[in-house]
Image (cartoon, rainbow, N blue to C red):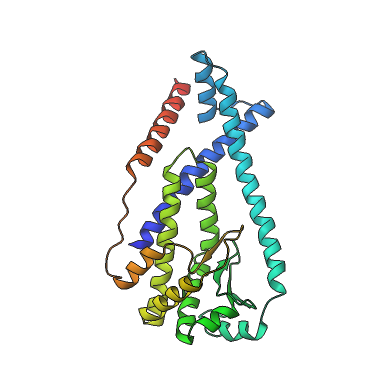
């Protein structure tokens, strides 16, 4: 059921956001390159503002569209730059021997795993199309062998499901299209379910919930690393309360309750855009 929740949230966010962003891009092309569009929500808004006698709002609309598209492009470029810098930095701290040792514990040994020389406990998965697991030597000193293996299973799940890419996309949509508040809620819920599912996978693979719970508590207690500017999924940075509850009671169903105000506001925006769309067809 949790997997269905996660898929539904990701697909919903992607469909809503992709449609709006594509409409925005087409709208900008129609303005700057002078070709007509048969159906476009933002062009419908522009025409309505002209009809009701408030053409100056056209410029507000154009500003919003330009901001959204440019903001999305900027975030994508920033991620690419930060990821490249991080990859170069990591190469100087890789512990090859320890990396090979832990890779042998993975089901698919072709997957990327790096152990870096770092005194603070660290366990993250980063990379969009070829995600790799990054563990620190400090983590190895903190956890037992079984606990380390449970963390490795947790991160392997994120790697297998391309969670860094999905997390970035769903965060991108919520940030750029901020005027649909439901997208922010979807982003928050998706992160929670994402971590719970990774914990569930680790518990099933290790056969013991104690290992993953001990590892989580130890890392929370010793957590010192700062939030990085690139997108990644971290073992002990998010959804801690929900994860502890799930580890203690894995049979309890995870329920999603839509936030009333955010849902109503988002639906109203869609209704207004739909009405504008219909007006252009009449």
Quadrant in the picture for residue 244 = bottom left
* Residue at the image position 67 percent from the left and 77 percent from the top: 94
The answer, for residue 257, to whether it is visible in the render is yes
- Does any portion of residue 40 appear in the rendered image? no
Query: At 54% from the left edge and 49% from the top edge, which residue is drawn?
Result: 172
Q: Provide residue 108's location: percent of width, then percent of height.
A: 53, 79
In this view, the residue in front, 184 or 6, is 184
* Residue 264 in the image, given as x and y percentages of width and height: 35, 37
Q: Quadrant of the C terminus?
A: top left
Question: Is residue 86 left or right of 232 when viewed as pictured?
Answer: right
Residue at horizontal 50 percent and vertical 72 percent from the top: 155
Quadrant of residue 274 within the rendered picture: top left
- Quadrant in which the N terminus appears: bottom left
Residue closest to the eye, 116 or 59? 116
Can you say whether 254 is above or below 41 in the image?
below
Which residue is at a point 35% across and 62% down the rendered structure image?
2
User: In the rendered image, which quarter is residue 271 located in?
Assistant: top left
- Residue 213: percent from left, percent from top: 39, 76
């Amino acid at each position: 059921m949790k997997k269905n929740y996660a898929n539904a949230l990701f697909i919903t966010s992607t469909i809503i956001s992709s449609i709006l962003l594509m409409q925005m891009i087409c709208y900008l092309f129609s303005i700057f390159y002078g070709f007509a569009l048969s159906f476009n929500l933002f062009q419908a808004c522009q025409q309505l503002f002209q009809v009701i006698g408030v053409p100056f709002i056209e410029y507000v609309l154009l500003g919003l569209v330009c901001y959204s598209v440019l903001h999305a492009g900027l975030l994508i470029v920033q991620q690419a730059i930060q990821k490249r810098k991080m990859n170069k930095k990591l190469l100087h701290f890789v512990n090859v021997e320890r990396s090979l040792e832990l890779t042998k514990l993975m089901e698919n040994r072709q997957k990327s795993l790096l152990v870096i020389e770092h005194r603070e406990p660290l366990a993250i998965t980063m990379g969009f199309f070829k995600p790799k697991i990054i563990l620190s030597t400090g983590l190895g000193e903190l956890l037992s062998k079984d606990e380390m293996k449970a963390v490795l299973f947790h991160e392997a799940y994120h790697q297998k499901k391309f969670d860094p890419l999905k997390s970035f996309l769903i965060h991108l949509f919520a940030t750029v299209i901020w005027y649909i508040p439901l997208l922010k809620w979807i982003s928050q819920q998706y992160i929670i379910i994402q971590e719970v599912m990774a914990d569930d996978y680790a518990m099933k693979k290790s056969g013991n919930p104690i290992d993953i719970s001990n590892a989580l508590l130890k890392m929370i207690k010793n957590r010192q690393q700062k939030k990085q500017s690139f997108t990644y999924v971290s073992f002990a940075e998010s959804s801690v309360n929900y994860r502890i509850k799930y580890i203690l009671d894995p049979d309890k169903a995870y329920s999603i309750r839509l936030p009333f105000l955010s849902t109503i506001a988002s639906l109203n925006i869609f209704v207004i855009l739909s009405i504008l769309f219909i007006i252009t067809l009449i």
